Amino acid sequence: MKKIKYFYNTHTLRFEKVEVPLRVKLLRVFGFIAASIVTAAFIFFIAGRLIESPETKLLRLQNDDLNDNYASLKERTRQLEMKIFELEDRDNNVYRSIFEAQPIPDSARVKDIETKKEVKLIERMGETDLVKSITAQLNNLSLRVAFQAKSYNDIDEMVKNKEKLLAAIPAIQPVSNKKLKRIASGFGSRMDPIYKVPKFHAGLDFTAPLGTPIYATADGVIKTANFNAGGYGNHVVINHGYGYETLYGHMVRIKARQGEHIKRGEVIGYVGNTGKSTGAHCHYEVHKNGQPVNPIYYFYNDLTPEQYDRLLKLAAASNQSLD
């Protein structure tokens, strides 16, 4: 049964029934509802923190797995970066130095390589941040790998060019000289056999029986193969490329033909006595960038160090040339 409240009215000197205004009733109802909502929210929050729902638990486990996987990916990326750095360092300081090529600066390897800041704590990173971070690192590695592949292609071309260069450098004697007794006159000032005055001798004279084979001392293309009335007689000039040319004079017969590609060791003619010559021999010259150089310094392919030293002494002897 509802209780009825009374109050004593001092003006009327009697007890009167307490009447509650409608506004107060509404405020009480609103206050009760608000308190109920706040209490329910608080209870739900506390319960949610203490008791995980299956969905929340699954999300938490997935997040933990994602963090672990990201840490693993980050470590693998770091190892890849270290390996690529080692390859780049070997490229610059080993492979390219062999071929006297300029190292490649990092700015050329990747256009926009910047110093990376430390990644935020993994637990604070959202999925988008994780994806962006991993993608950026992998893109960086991809660019560096692609450039490194191109660099190794360039080095491969350098190897091929180096092989061609080595094949183009005169490296053997133009006639067989196993006993090292065929050099009759060396490079430099020598007595002219006809005018009997000192004259610059631009090559080496190899004495040999008439018809002895004369060999190309390096790979190249026959530039000249004809008779020269100025003194060389029947002679051959080979253009080896890379600034090298060789001349072979006084042949009795020329075997090579102009424009022919020749390999080191191929017979290009035979020892003779044509032109300005006082005896059967092969006059041999080496030119580098248009200037005659001492051929004795290029006989390193078919001689031991002891033989080479002996040949140097023979070629340095002051004597009379044969042409």
Image (spheres, helix red, strand yellow):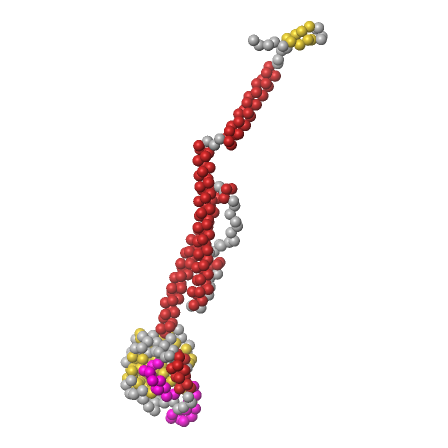
Looking at the rendering, which quadrant does residue 144 occupy? Answer: bottom left
Q: Is residue 61 left or right of residue 301?
A: right
Question: Is 72 placed above or below 16 here?
Answer: below
Q: Position of residue 44 (x, y in %)?
A: 51, 28
Q: Position of residue 101 (x, y in %)?
A: 44, 66
Q: Is residue 230 visible?
A: no
State the quadrant of the C terminus.
Answer: bottom left
Q: Is residue 129 left or right of residue 303?
A: right
Confirm whether the magenta stretch covers residue 182.
yes
Q: Is residue 115 visible?
A: yes
Q: Nearer the viewer, residue 203 or 79?
A: 79
State the quadrant of the N terminus.
Answer: top right
Identify the residue at image location x=44%, y=35%.
58
Identify the residue at image location x=40%, y=90%.
319
Looking at the rendering, which quadrant does residue 308 occupy? Answer: bottom left
Q: Nearer the viewer, residue 268 or 217?
A: 217
Q: Nearer the viewer, residue 262 or 257?
A: 262
The overriding secondary structure of the stretch rendered in magenta is loop
Magenta segment: 173-198
Identify the residue at image location x=47%, y=32%.
52
